[in-house]
Image (tube, rainbow, N blue to C red):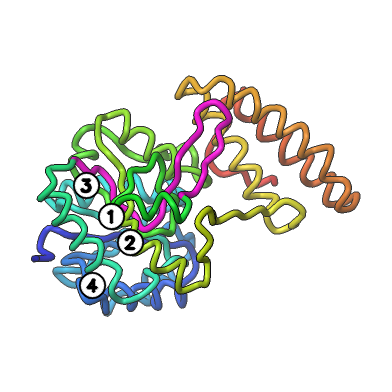
Amino acid sequence: MKNSGFAAFIITYERTEILLKTISAIKNQTFPPAYLLIIDNSLSNYTEKALQEYISDSFEYYRVGYNSGPAGGANIGLEKLTNLGYDWIYWGDDNNPPRDLNVFQEMFEALQDFEAAKENPGILGGKGGDLNKLTGRLRSLSNKKLLEKKFAEVDVIPGGHTMIVNSRVIAAGCLPDEKLFFGFEEMDFCLKVKKAGFNLFVDSQTWLKIRRRDSHFEENYRWKDSGFGKKEAIKRDYYSSRNLLDIFYKNKMFPAFAILLLKCLGKSLLSFRFGWNYGKAMAKAQFSAVIHFFSGKFGKQVEL
């Protein structure tokens, strides 16, 4: 198993110390990428100065010149590394390092099994979920389902969960949509990849091992989370609502689109139970998300 066809990129924005730790976590993998590209969305030059000593034949720093967000950064990273001839590309964020030093080795051992089984993986990830196209809900896989197969096919692999992309999907015209800026850009990309005829898989056994390590033994256990009621999550909720409206609409998931519009209204009303100030901020975010979608206003919104 050789790493010569494996490259990685990390998207960063004004977080030099965090980035340096993530670079270390990637370079110290038992199966490290042959090439590492840093996509810098920073407005200052602190990150550029800190990385000068790293630049080499196997390390590249690329400064975007503006904040293109995770979506824009991923677009640049995937296209640049595909053009350089790499077969498999790790999509990384500065604040989401690999969970341990064996992650890439486990993933590429899984890829060998895929090749033996003549599967057509477009993306391989550490975790994933199934998308209900009627409701728009993304459901994590249960322990029971993970036990059924060594590799589970999924609809979406979320960010921060060791997404490794086959460069053939980039050559087929699948790239992240820069206009989304932030929020569900991975879902949008995964749906494009599936439409292009590629499959998405997760390594079931490794995922199950992690759940057992964290004492989640129940057969029907699924991970759940919610940021509703948390002030720091309001901006994320804006981008999530706006971008999901776009994703559902362009994928002709019209029932899910209608349900999401109702959810935006519901969130705006129910948010006031967490206080007047929180309610006003959430209502503004949700109404802005709907208005911006219909008016075609995407990218970063600084007024939120």
- The nearer-to-camera label among 2 and 4 is 2
Q: Earlier in the sequence, mark 2 or mark 4?
A: 4
Residue beneath disc 2 = 205
Residue beneath disc 4 = 55
Q: Is residue 265 above or below residue 64?
A: above
Mark-to-mark CA distance, 4 and 1: 39 Å
Q: Amino acid at mark 1?
A: Lys
Q: Earlier in the sequence, mark 3 or mark 4?
A: 4
- The nearer-to-camera label among 3 and 2 is 2
Q: Residue 71's x, y, as percent?
A: 43, 46
Residue beneath disc 1 = 150
Q: Residue furthest right?
A: 276
Numbered range of the magenta stretch: 120-141
Residue beneath disc 3 = 166
- The nearer-to-camera label among 3 and 4 is 3
Mark-to-mark CA distance, 2 and 1: 6 Å
